[in-house]
Amino acid sequence: MIAILACLSAALAIGAGAFGAHGVADAKAADWLRTGGLYQLVHAVAAIALTGVARGAAALLLAGAAIFALSLYIMALGGPRWLGAVTPVGGTLMIAGWLWAAWTFGQR
């Protein structure tokens, strides 16, 4: 299931990045879409790579990337700016996922 979600996350990231590059005129919105897409794509690929080794860390990376990227996407599409306060929660979860992955590899 993690690999399926990671693939869907990567597809969404590509769509967001493409929309940011070609579908919005506002520079700030384009930047949010680009940043969200980049982080979401990198963490989707990382989650796929970790699926067989550190499933918990992979799930945490996906959850963090979803919160991080989706808060940026919603703001880029005109949503409330207070969502910018939610974005760091996703970043914190991604950091925790990487630390969990490091710990898992250290135990091997």
Image (cartoon, helix red, strand yellow):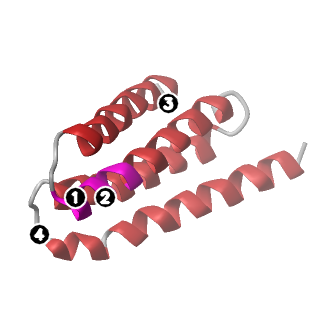
The magenta stretch is 26-35
Q: Calculate the distance from the C-alpha at mark 1 to the C-alpha at mark 4.
A: 13 Å
Identify the element where label 4 is drawn: loop
Q: Nearer the viewer, residue 79 or 35?
A: 35
Q: Calculate the distance from the C-alpha at mark 4 to the C-alpha at mark 3.
A: 30 Å
Identify the element where label 3 is drawn: helix
How crowded is the residue under tag 2: few (<14 C-alpha within 10 Å), some, or many (20+)? Answer: many
Give the residue at x 70% y 60%.
Answer: 99
How crowded is the residue under tag 4: few (<14 C-alpha within 10 Å), some, or many (20+)? Answer: few
Q: Nearer the viewer, mark 4 or mark 3?
A: 4
- Write down the residue under mark 3: 2
Name the mark on residue 32.
2
Q: What residue type is labelled 1?
A: Ala
Say if the magenta span includes residue 30: yes
Q: Quadrant of residue 8?
A: top left
Identify the element where label 1 is drawn: helix
Q: Nearer the viewer, residue 40 or 51?
A: 40
How crowded is the residue under tag 1: few (<14 C-alpha within 10 Å), some, or many (20+)? Answer: many
Main secondary structure of the magenta stretch: helix
Give the residue at x 30% y 51%.
Answer: 33
Q: Calculate the distance from the C-alpha at mark 2 to the C-alpha at mark 1.
A: 5 Å
Identify the element where label 2 is drawn: helix
**Left or right, 8 with reference to 62:** left
